[in-house]
Structures are given as structure tokens and as C-alpha cells.
Image (spheres, rainbow, N blue to C red):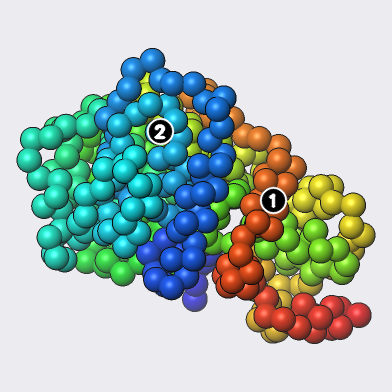
Amino acid sequence: MTNRRQFLQTALGAAGLLGWTAATAGRAQGAIHSNTIATSAQANVTSQVTRAPKPLKILFLGGTGFIGPHEIEYALARGHEVTMFNRGSKAGLYGDRVEEIVGNRDAQIDDGLKGLEGDRTWDVIVDNSGYVPRHVRDSVALLKERTSRYIYVSTVAVYDFDAAHEFAEDGPLAKLDDPAVEEVTGATYGPLKAECDRIVRRELGDRSTVVRPAYIIGPGDTTDRFTYWVDRIHQGGDVVGPPNREVSVQFVDVRDLCPWIIGLGENDTPGTFNAAAAPWTRAGLLWGIRATTTEAVRFHWPTAELAAELEMPVPMLNWGEVSNSFANAASLGAGQVYRPLAESALGTLQWWRGQSQERRDGARGWPAEGLEAKLLERLG
């Protein structure tokens, strides 16, 4: 029987895996997404961004998914010298503004990490693409003496959900039952990231900074989760909400998270931080989005059993029956800000409606046409 810890790890792992596969799989869809993500990120860096007092050399491991473009565009606006290491599947995404080193986090594939070998140094390394402990261990071993600050982007899925409901940064982390496992699935995503998290903190000590975001939302989202609710609610009418509507959910807008991550590097800030705005209930989240439209909207709340029977996907809000909360006092103390939900909803809507029809038709994980009507009929 699956216990609560395993269920929540699988649930949050599936959420994280959706973001991971969005960034790493589906080349045809990736081609559609990549330019729109970079364009969205660049559009969100305004002339109000001031130059940093001291330009830094920053290496990004990854940088073409959801958060990477927002980080990189902000770093460029601040006047930093940016290098990006990835597999080269979206070469030229930033033109000649970013140095690209092609390789693979897996040292056993193609040239692996060879492009990063040598004695070259960077002031800050931002690790966005570490999902497998072996990959992170190899990268850290190669680079740890060649940087002053190593920032690892982890996830709140690293926590042990069988041990607690409320998590500060010193909370218990999930255990990786089989150290040989490297396949990233919904069930293994959290424990694998937890082990990567441990490696970075153990090997780099005070030179490590670990950021554990909750759901990341906002313009450029490759997972299309939060986007579904914004788009659907702004269409108006009868909207089928999630089961277990009183369960809490936390998130962070990408436009708040990514500048803050760069700021942690600029300020040489050590530590571990949950990046999660104050919790909403699932129902409250939908009502908050509802407040940003003048369309007439009526919500309907199915039971978990009915949603499961009809296999109704409920993006971002269909995992877990128990509320878990992630403390954010440390992140606030380190300068993280969390914008109002209304700003996130309206910013996401503006971005989404500016996408091509092909992009919008290819939304990931949304209910098939007619499925919501079937559920509404069952709900009477």
C-alpha cells in the first residue's frame, strides 16, 4: 500500500517531472516554446533594472527551460558576463550576448563535462539542471574550487512528507531508497533532488546556496499548469475546480524568483531557502484568479472519486489530500518578494494570449475537449 509520504513524493515528483520533461523532451514542442520563453523573459526585464555595482562572471548549468531565460535576461540587464552550459539543442537562443558551451551533465554521454574542464573560474554558478546525484556530484567535483558561490535550484519536493506537514528549511528530507536509481519519474523526482541538494551543501559548505521553490508560475511557463486556470477562468461560464478544495497550495512567480536568485549570487548569500509565497487553499486560488476578470464564472467542485473516475486532469491542483506548508521567513529575510496573485494571473494571461495558435493548441496536461462538459453533467 502506498503511504502518504510515497504518495506526496509521487505527486510533487510528477509536478516537477512535468517541468523537467517540458525543458528536456519533445523537440518539436521545444522549438515552439524556446523562442516564446526567451522573448517573454526579455520583455519582463525593463529599463528600470539598474546595472550591478560589480559585474560578475556567471555560469549557468542549463538555461533554456522556464526559469533559465528569466535568470539570464536579468543577469544580462545587470551587466554580468554570462556563460551557459547545456546540450546545445537550442543554440543561439540569446544571440551573441551569451557564451554557450555544449556538453552533457552525464559524463558518460558524448563529451560530457569536457567543455568545463580546465582552470577557468566563475564568480557564481547557477545549477538549474541537476536532477541526478551522479551528475551533480561530477559537476561539483569539477567546479567547486573554481567558483565563490554555487547556487543549486532544488524544490520543495525534497521534503519527507511522511514525517511532517510543515517544513522549514531544516526539515527532514526524503530518502533515496536505492542509490543506483537514476531514472527521473514522478516517484523518484523528489528523492533524487533531495540527494542532489545534500551533495551541494555537503561539498561546498558556506559557498553553497540552495533554493527550494514551490510551484513556479508566470509568463513563459512551459508546464502550462497555472496557465490553465487563468485561461479557463477568463473564458467564464461553468468551471470545474479541483477536488479537495480546502487543501493548500504555494507558489512563486518566476519574475520574483529569478531576479532574487541572481541577487543571492551578487550578494554572495549562503544558506538554504524555501521560495514559496503564503499559502492559498485551492478554492481560494481559483477565486483569486476570478477576481481579475469581469466574466461571469461559476465554480463546481467534484469529489476526488468522480474526478478519478472520469480521469479529469486538474493541472497543478490534483495531488494530495492533506495540506503541507513551506516556511518562507528565510527567503523574505534574504530579500525575496512575492507579488500579489492578481499580478501573476494578469501577467500570465497577457503572455498566453500573445502566443501563437499552435502554441496554445499544444498546451500540456489540459482536459480534452468535452471532458469538462461530461463532468458538469455528472455534477448536475
Q: Earlier in the sequence, mark 2 or mark 1?
A: 2
* Residue type marked 1: Gln
Residue 44 screen position, x and y as percent:
57, 39
Residue 259 visible (yes or no): yes
Residue at position x 72%, y 57% in the image: 230
Residue 187 visible (yes or no): no
Q: Up-down: is 186 above or below 207?
A: below
Closest to the observer, 149 or 5? 149
Location of residue 112 (image quadrant)? bottom left
* Left or right of residue 54: residue 116: left
Check disc 1 and report the residue beneath it: 350
Residue at position x 65%, y 56% in the image: 354
* Residue type marked 2: Ala
Question: Callout 1: few (<14), some (14-19), or many (20+) C-alpha neighbours within 10 Å?
Answer: few
Check disc 2 and report the residue beneath it: 75
Name the secondary structure under disc 1: helix
Name the secondary structure under disc 2: helix
Residue 231 screen position, x and y as percent:
73, 61
Question: Callout 2: few (<14), some (14-19), or many (20+) C-alpha neighbours within 10 Å?
Answer: many
